[in-house]
Image (tube, rainbow, N blue to C red):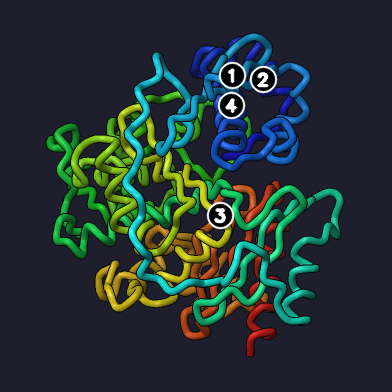
């Protein structure tokens, strides 16, 4: 999610222009702030106000004078307001992470059982950063450099895996091996993995229509899980790649910070195009799939979290992973997973190894290739829950022309989050930070991957 034109944002809040009430529009900004500060304080163990100074998009920094924040460590919550409107409270709920409240806080789920011994081989020997070779150190120097003051990269963590082992990593001051960081839309790729597990178990057919009573009597009845994962559902529910003042009334943006049951509004959205014929990147599509994961895992929040930990995080050794849930108990699979850089690397390694770890197949045969196969009509180069360099999308062509392998694919999140996988080279590159220029963040990521490939030859 991105903001534009902060003065106009504040003016709309104060004057009541737009499709929604001023309080609801303001809640996009305040929900964002309270959620991020809650995650920083109670998941990542960072000082929340210092974190917010880095993580707040520049337009929100410009209206910070009109915002107020309260961090209540005793009750484990953060409260934010903008110009006295749009109050949003985010509360920490243990294994379910932080939730932006819409009414009374639901009880926190019970503690999850301890993770069993992971199936994935250990990727690093200690809790200290692995220094890497001179060539990799030079690549990391560039990844953490700030060559353009107009487009700061704010890199906070980089991990490079080669053949399943960390060969280099680095962290910004105040961050470290044990610091979970927000993956934003990289979480969509985790939803891909959870669906893959369900497919392997025979509980989901990706090409079969998704049963939804609200869709039974119209063209939405043809929507499949594959359509939703590839962003070709045809549902008219806002474009999550767009930037502008329209984000204040964009349902795909408001969903994340104003709705208790995030999938409900997306399910009720009308068709804007016949399913399978038009690509539009929307948080709502992934959130519908997240509800499906919850329902098939057992139907409630606790069952969904146990499923994710038993079937994915546990086998990979992702002990830091916090998959947040919404007020309905569904994972916020569109945007809200926190994990350390090493654990994000472990996730990438699952795909580098074709979905198999420790001799056990977690993802179905062919699932990794399916995930990286380009979706027709996607200009950015998008597969099924992953961005991909395969195909002829303009974004894919630019990345390949800049030196990335055509086989590479990646989980990608807002503000410069990347997990890049190059299977034939057994390379996984993780980059996390607070970058507000998508072009600069992408260029830095491409350069890092190219340099890492050269260093491990």
Given contact means CB atoms under 8 Å apart, are the residues at marks 2 and 1 in contact?
Answer: yes
Given contact means CB atoms under 8 Å apart, are the residues at marks 1 and 3 in contact?
Answer: no
Q: Secondary structure at mark 1?
A: strand
- How far apart are the two marked residues, 4 and 1, measured between alpha carbons? 6 Å
Residue assigned mark 1? 79
Residue 69's tag is 2
Given contact means CB atoms under 8 Å apart, are the residues at marks 4 and 1 in contact?
Answer: yes
Q: Earlier in the sequence, mark 4 or mark 1?
A: 4
| Residue in the image at 23% along x and 48% along y | 223
- How far apart are the two marked residues, 4 and 2, measured between alpha carbons? 8 Å
* Residue 80 % position (x, y): 62, 19
Q: Earlier in the sequence, mark 4 or mark 3?
A: 4
Relative height, residue 452 to residue 364 (above, below): below
Q: Earlier in the sequence, mark 4 or mark 2?
A: 4
Q: Secondary structure at mark 4?
A: helix
The answer to whether 251 appears left or right of 417 in the picture is: left
* Residue 456 % position (x, y): 64, 85
Residue assigned mark 4? 34
| Residue in the image at 32% along x and 46% along y | 113
Q: Nearer the viewer, mark 1 or mark 3?
A: 3
Q: Which of 351 and 118 lies nearest the eye of the viewer?
A: 118
- How far apart are the two marked residues, 4 and 3, measured between alpha carbons? 21 Å
Q: Quadrant of residue 368?
A: bottom left
Residue 340's tag is 3
Q: Which of 262 and 379 lies nearest the eye of the viewer?
A: 262
- How far apart are the two marked residues, 3 and 2, measured between alpha carbons? 26 Å
Relative height, residue 77 to residue 403 (above, below): above
Given contact means CB atoms under 8 Å apart, are the residues at marks 3 and 2 in contact?
Answer: no
Residue 422's tag is none
């Amino acid at each position: 999610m991105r903001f534009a034109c902060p003065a106009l944002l504040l003016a709309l809040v104060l004057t009541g222009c737009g499709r929604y009430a001023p309080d609801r529009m303001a809640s996009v900004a305040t929900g964002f702030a309270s959620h991020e500060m809650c995650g920083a304080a109670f998941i990542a163990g960072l000082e929340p106000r210092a974190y917010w100074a880095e993580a707040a998009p520049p337009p929100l920094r410009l209206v910070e004078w009109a915002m107020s924040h309260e961090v209540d460590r005793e009750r484990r919550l953060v409260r934010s307001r903008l110009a006295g409107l749009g109050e949003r409270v985010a509360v920490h709920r243990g294994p379910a992470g932080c939730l932006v409240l819409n009414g009374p806080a639901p009880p926190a789920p019970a503690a999850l059982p301890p993770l069993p011994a992971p199936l994935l081989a250990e990727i690093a020997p200690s809790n200290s950063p692995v220094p890497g070779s001179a060539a990799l150190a030079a690549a990391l120097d560039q990844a953490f450099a700030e060559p353009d003051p107009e487009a700061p990269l704010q890199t906070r963590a980089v991990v490079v895996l080669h053949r399943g082992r960390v060969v280099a990593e680095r962290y910004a001051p105040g961050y470290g091996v044990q610091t979970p960081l927000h993956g934003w839309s990289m979480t969509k790729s985790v939803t891909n993995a959870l669906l893959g597990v369900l497919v392997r178990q025979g509980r989901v057919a990706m090409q079969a229509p998704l049963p939804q009573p609200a869709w039974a009597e119209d063209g939405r009845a043809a929507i499949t899980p594959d359509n939703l994962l590839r962003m070709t559902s045809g549902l008219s529910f806002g474009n999550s790649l767009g930037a502008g003042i329209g984000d204040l009334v964009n349902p795909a943006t408001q969903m994340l910070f104003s709705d208790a049951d995030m999938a409900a509004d997306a399910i009720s959205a009308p068709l804007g195009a016949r399913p399978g014929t038009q690509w539009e990147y929307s948080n709502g599509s992934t959130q519908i799939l997240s509800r499906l994961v919850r329902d098939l895992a057992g139907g409630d929040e606790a069952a969904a979290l146990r499923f994710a930990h038993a079937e994915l995080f546990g086998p990979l050794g992702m002990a830091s992973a916090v998959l947040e849930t919404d007020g309905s108990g569904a994972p916020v699979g569109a945007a809200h997973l926190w994990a350390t850089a090493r654990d994000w690397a472990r996730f990438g390694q699952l795909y580098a190894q074709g979905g198999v770890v420790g001799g056990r197949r977690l993802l179905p045969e062919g699932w990794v290739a399916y995930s990286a196969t380009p979706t027709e009509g996607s200009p950015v180069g998008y597969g099924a829950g992953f961005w991909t360099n395969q195909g002829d999308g303009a974004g894919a062509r630019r990345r390949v022309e800049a030196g990335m392998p055509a086989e590479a694919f990646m989980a990608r999140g807002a503000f410069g989050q990347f997990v890049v996988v190059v299977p034939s080279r057994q390379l996984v590159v993780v980059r996390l930070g607070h970058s507000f220029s998508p072009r600069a963040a992408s260029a830095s990521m491409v350069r890092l991957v190219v340099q890492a490939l050269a260093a491990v030859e």
